Amino acid sequence: MRKKDQSVERQARADAPPATPGIIEVAPDIFQFRGEKPSSHVYVIRGQAKNVLIDTGVAAGFSDIKRHLSELGLRVKDINLVVLTHEHFDHIGAAAFFHPTAVVAAHRLAANKVELQDEFVTFHKYRDELSKPFWVDIWMEDGSIVDLGNHTLYTLHTPGHTSGCMCLYEPEEGLLFTGDTMFAGGTLSEISVGGNVSDYMNSVQRLSHLKVRKICPGHGRISDTPEEDLPKAIGYAQSLLGDCKMFFEAFIKTRQLQDKIGSAFGFWKETQKPW
């Protein structure tokens, strides 16, 4: 190897991020901080114009985020923008710790729930998780753009898991940050409060039209086979929609049977009062 090549290689090793457990380099200047259950993963994009955090995990994981940022040569106050993929506690829990110096953004439907501290929807109370109030500075819409200089993020409103779910697409590297909208292998998350199956179906169909090289989900592994996973997600959504139809058909038949049995045995039914 020539001296010049050796020098370039040494410099590349010096500039490379530390091989630290819990940090995965997804693409140049884009990193994943692995989340431990129940926390989501956290993604950091080191931009020329600003640094962005995608989701924050649970509040208890803030010390790990702080340590991982330090390993990348960043401080908490170096994060300029925090983008939340949706309103659940395992994705927004540590957002309050960044709020003194960063701007927080989310889709408007998620932002509204956070703003009202709707703990029934965020699941803070249900999971007995710590909750530090914060507000959302930017209420985003489908098609919003975040320009970081070296990377550009396009927002896609992808309701289904919740009404306020949002994915972020980085076309240069072909990265799709999906939060809980979709996981590796084409797996979809549960239909949570505010979500519905038909919206889910539409959302995954929209995602399938993007040129994606890697799916970066909120939980589980990163997928480098989106061409396989996205059709699987559509198929899963279709089967989920079919299961829901079968369930409601069975439910209606059961109700109709109950009404017939009730009238046959003279069950009392409250009549409408005339006043």
Image (cartoon, rainbow, N blue to C red):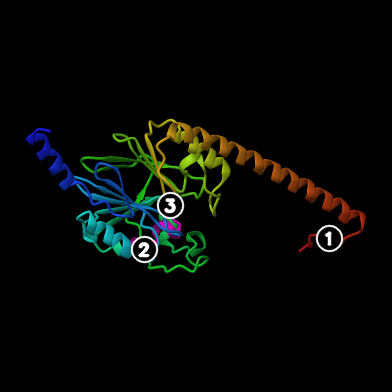
Relative side of 116 to 273, left or right: left
Can residue 75 be found in the magenta stretch?
Answer: no
Label 1, label 3: how far apart the Cα atoms are? 44 Å
Residue appearing at x 43%, y 35% in the figure: 226
- Residue 39: give x, y in percent of width and height: 42, 58
Relative side of 49 to 207, left or right: left
Q: Nearer the viewer, mark 2 or mark 3?
A: 2
- Residue 135: give x, y in percent of width and height: 35, 61
The front one of 261 and 80 is: 80
Relative side of 19 to 118, left or right: left
Q: Residues within 10 Å of mark 3 (few under 14, many from 20)?
A: many
Marker disc for residue 86: 3
The front one of 199 and 130 is: 130
Residue appearing at x 19%, y 55% in the figure: 73
The front one of 64 and 208 is: 64
Q: Residues within 10 Å of mark 1 (few under 14, many from 20)?
A: few
Label 2, label 1: how far apart the Cα atoms are? 54 Å
Marker disc for residue 159: none
**Is 20 above or below relative to 245?**
below
Q: Nearer the viewer, mark 1 or mark 3?
A: 3
